[in-house]
């Protein structure tokens, strides 16, 4: 059933570390062989063995309008015929910036980059340059790409200092990154007080999506806004996942809390390598060449990528009803899955915000890293593979959000529920048999 994927993975491993160009693709958390894809249209994926799947990964977020959306493909084709890059200004960069501002009003100035990683790395540099301070507070379980600053986990025991979560990240970097608990304002206040006058920025996912979907608790974002104002700290919302997904204006609009700097990625590039960071004029004024904080990129604002992103954003801007529909689909999926899990008598906690949703196989409410970790990973593994066999492609990790697209039809959602009914039954049986 997966013979060609197996063969391709074997070959890839001879030439590429672990056979993949980004680790989450390797199926390490669920086991088995990663599926190699050939093509996709809307929410249907086709793999190299001609198996078809309903897609709940959406390239980890960008594909909010589904794969191969006609206006996006046409924009890419047209732009590429006029050259794939100039390394000089083009009008489309300003048009994207204008559209981003129209959709997200506190983005007065925006700089384009090539990935979410680059956006977050640059936003932190800007915050440091703007405030003249060095430390950064991040949250355990939030992901901001793979820049050194962010590959830091909470230190052990009484230590408030972070420690590197990857070899190659220095202790020197770790000492400037402080780690707080998500949805826990007190943990932030404590760090701010202990490091008074030294913290440049607080960075977070306003809805966490990289430890499964974890929405902010009532008052959490507002509280951070107040703390950052009191301590003169730049508040950075990492909206790489949530931007243009949770609403036209992202999580900021959904929760009506507005950051000083915001990072984007994923949806903004429609599947092309695009990231961006932007915010208040006076903060962005430090960015070179307007100001002294260096930031650059040979391919930044690339015309093909900009045209693709513009095409997708324009559709989202013009169709507010898409967000209403995505919300309804998310609600529907949550309701149906909840009913099923209850029928099967399986412990669960489902978190959902709009088109982001996760099932945690646990009896406890999931509000942060520690509670997320109570999920039964072995059960997810079984469930994932039973779903895959039944033509549903879920994220290959229990700690990733599922994504809905405008192209998920009611029938696809119902087929997913039917598959889940069988998959949960089989997974439960296998789980009990150990
Ligand atoms: C995906 C992601 C990133 C990193 O973006 P890349 O384009 O993979 O570098 C950063 N922050 C969040 C919240 C993300 O989901």
Image (cartoon, rainbow, N blue to C red):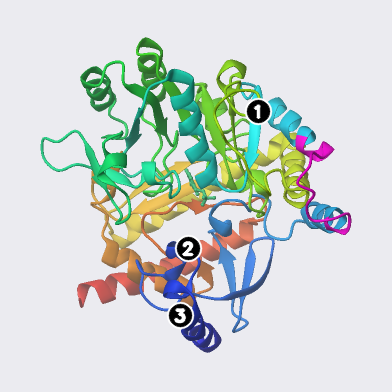
**Residue 347 placement (x, y as % from top left):** 26, 55
Residue at image mark 2: 22
Report the side of 74 relative to 198 (left or right): right
SS under mark 1: loop
Q: Quadrant of residue 100?
A: top right
Tell me the chief SS of the magenta region.
loop
Badge 1: residue crowd in 10 Å (few <14, some 14–19, many ≥20): few
- Specify start and end residues of the magenta stretch as a single range: 80-93
Question: How far is mark 3 from mark 2, CA to CA?
Answer: 13 Å
Task: Give residue 210's position: percent from left, percent from top.
Answer: 41, 48
Task: Single out the mark in the foreground, 1 or 3.
Answer: 1
Q: Nearer the viewer, mark 1 or mark 2?
A: 1
Task: Report the front residue among 56 and 340.
Answer: 56
Q: Is residue 82 magenta?
A: yes
Depth check: 353 or 286 in front?
286
Nearest the eye: 166 or 208: 166
Residue 354 visible to an observer of this rendering: no
SS under mark 3: helix
Which residue appears at 82% of the width and 40% of the height? Answer: 90
- Residue at label 3? 13
Residue 289 is marked as 1
Label 2 beta carbon within 8 A of ligand 1: yes
């Amino acid at each position: 059933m997966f013979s060609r994927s197996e063969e391709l993975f074997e070959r890839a491993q001879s030439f590429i570390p672990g056979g993949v160009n980004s680790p989450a693709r390797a199926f390490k958390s669920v086991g088995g062989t990663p599926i190699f894809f050939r093509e996709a249209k809307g929410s249907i994926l086709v793999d190299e063995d001609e198996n078809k799947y309903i897609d709940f990964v959406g390239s980890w977020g960008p594909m909010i309008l589904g794969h191969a959306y006609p206006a996006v493909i046409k924009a890419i084709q047209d732009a590429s015929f006029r050259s794939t890059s100039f390394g000089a200004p083009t009008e489309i960069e300003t048009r994207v910036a204008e559209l981003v501002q129209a959709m997200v009003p506190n983005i007065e100035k925006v700089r384009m980059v090539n990935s979410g990683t680059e956006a977050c790395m640059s936003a932190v540099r800007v915050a440091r340059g703007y405030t003249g301070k060095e430390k950064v507070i991040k949250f355990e379980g939030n992901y901001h790409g793979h820049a050194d600053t962010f590959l830091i986990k909470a230190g052990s025991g009484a230590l408030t200092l972070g420690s590197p979560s990857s070899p190659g990240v220095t202790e020197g970097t770790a000492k400037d990154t402080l780690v707080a608990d998500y949805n826990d304002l007190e943990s932030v206040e404590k760090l701010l007080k202990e490091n008074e006058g030294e913290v440049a920025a607080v960075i977070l996912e306003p809805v966490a999506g990289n430890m499964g979907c974890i929405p902010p608790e009532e008052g959490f974002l507002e509280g951070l806004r107040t703390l950052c104002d009191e301590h003169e700290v730049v508040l950075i919302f990492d909206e790489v996942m949530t931007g243009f997904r949770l609403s036209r204006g992202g999580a900021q609009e959904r929760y009506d809390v507005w950051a000083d700097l915001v990072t984007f990625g994923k949806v903004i590039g429609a599947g092309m390598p695009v990231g961006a960071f932007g915010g208040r004029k006076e903060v962005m004024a430090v960015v070179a060449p307007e100001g002294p904080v260096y930031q650059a990129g040979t391919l930044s604002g690339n015309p093909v990528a900009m045209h693709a992103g513009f095409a997708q954003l324009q559709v989202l801007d013009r169709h507010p009803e898409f967000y209403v529909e995505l919300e309804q689909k998310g609600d529907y999926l949550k309701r149906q899955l909840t009913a099923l899990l209850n029928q099967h008598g399986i412990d669960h906690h489902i978190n959902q915000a709009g088109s982001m949703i996760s099932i945690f196989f646990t009896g406890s409410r999931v509000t942060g890293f520690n509670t997320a970790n109570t999920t039964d990973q072995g059960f997810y593994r079984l469930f994932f593979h039973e779903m895959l066999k039944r033509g549903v492609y879920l994220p290959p990790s229990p700690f990733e959000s599922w994504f809905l697209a405008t192209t998920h039809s009611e029938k696809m959602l119902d087929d997913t529920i039917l598959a889940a009914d069988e998959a949960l039954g089989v997974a439960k049986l296998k789980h009990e048999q150990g």
